[in-house]
């Protein structure tokens, strides 16, 4: 399998500075744009600066939220992974949430087109007293497509202990197995770590404070995510 190109990193770092927030941002394939700021609460939207994901791409996103800061992160649109013509693409996300901080990320879907091969990893470190709430959605194929391959590695730690550890492979040899997709093509997941959420149907409570809600269709509204905010 051909190797991917050198990683291109987007970094967001926010820390308290008196009554406001000090922000350091670096643009890579994604451009972070501040849409709202009030006190220690900040809203940032991620905007793609070029077509992605293409074969050979390696996108890196790093987010650091300092003590006492609330960051609301959104994507401006879904990400489409195109046919890489035999080349794989990689997406690496690293999140750090300090004590007393919170990161709420409503992510738009990743659409894996026919012929695409995507390797995606997420590592999040949430300190004691910190909170991470995120929505992650993947869809295999556009309308009329079967969809490509997706390999996901997820590690979310709370207070330096594993809270969520998952290795998910969605390809032709796995997607029809029991407990995978079956006839579905979408997995939509809301995860909260650092706080026990309000009760909801079909949730999996974690050993550490937190829970996961997963469905096989994309909600029209924010539903569980909004309820847990």
Image: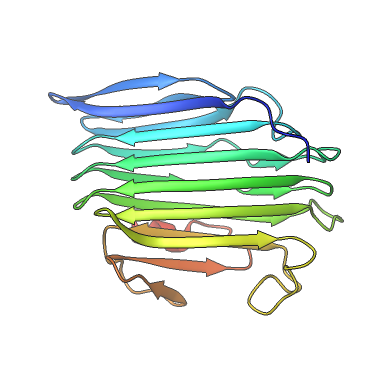
Q: Where is residue 116 in the image (x, y as percent from the top left)?
A: 78, 45
Structure colour scheme: rainbow
Q: Is residue 204 left or right of residue 92?
A: left
Q: Which residue is drawn at 73% across and 49% down?
A: 112
Task: Point out the image quarter for the N terminus.
Answer: top right
Q: Which residue lies furthest to the left in this view?
A: 18
Decide if residue 218 is in sight here.
no
Q: Where is residue 7 in the image (x, y as percent from the top left)?
A: 58, 27
Q: Residue at x 56, y 35 (%)?
A: 76
Q: Is residue 108 left or right of residue 95?
A: right
Q: In this view, does 180 lie to the left or right of 70?
A: right
- Residue sitting nearer the eye, 47 or 208: 208
Task: Point out the image quarter for the C terminus.
Answer: bottom left
- Residue sitting nearer the eye, 191 or 227: 191
Q: Which residue lies furthest to the bottom in this view?
A: 178
Q: Is residue 120 left or right of residue 80?
A: left
Q: Which residue is drawn at 25% across and 30% down?
A: 38
Q: Where is residue 224 in the image (x, y as percent from the top left)?
A: 43, 63
- Residue sitting nearer the eye, 112 or 135: 112
Q: In which quarter of the image is residue 79?
A: top right
Q: Where is residue 12 in the image (x, y as percent from the top left)?
A: 39, 28
Above or below, 57 relative to 80? above
Q: In which quarter of the image is residue 85?
A: top right
Above or below, 221 relative to 116? below
Q: Residue at x 59, y 54 (%)?
A: 152
Decide if residue 50 is in sight here.
yes
């Amino acid at each position: 399998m051909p190797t991917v190109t050198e990683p291109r990193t987007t970094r967001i770092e926010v820390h308290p500075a008196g009554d406001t927030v000090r922000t350091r941002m670096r643009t890579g394939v994604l451009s972070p744009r501040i849409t709202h700021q009030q006190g220690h609460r900040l809203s940032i939207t991620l905007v793609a600066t070029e077509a992605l994901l293409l074969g050979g791409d390696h996108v890196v996103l790093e987010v650091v939220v300092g003590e006492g800061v609330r960051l609301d992160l959104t994507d401006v649109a879904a990400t489409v992974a195109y046919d890489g013509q035999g080349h794989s693409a990689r997406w690496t996300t690293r999140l750090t949430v300090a004590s007393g901080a919170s990161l709420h990320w409503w992510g738009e879907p990743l659409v894996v087109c026919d012929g695409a091969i995507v390797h995606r990893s997420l590592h999040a470190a949430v300190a004691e007293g910190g909170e991470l709430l995120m929505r992650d959605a993947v869809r295999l194929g556009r309308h009329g497509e079967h969809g490509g391959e997706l390999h996901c590695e997820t590690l979310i730690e709370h207070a330096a202990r594993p809270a969520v550890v998952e290795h998910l492979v969605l390809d032709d040899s796995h997607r029809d197995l029991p407990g995978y997709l079956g006839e579905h093509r979408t997995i939509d997941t809301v995860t909260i770590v650092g706080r026990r959420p309000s009760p909801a149907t079909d949730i999996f409570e974690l050993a550490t404070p937190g829970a996961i809600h997963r469905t096989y269709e994309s909600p029209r509204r924010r539903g569980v995510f909004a309820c847990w905010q």
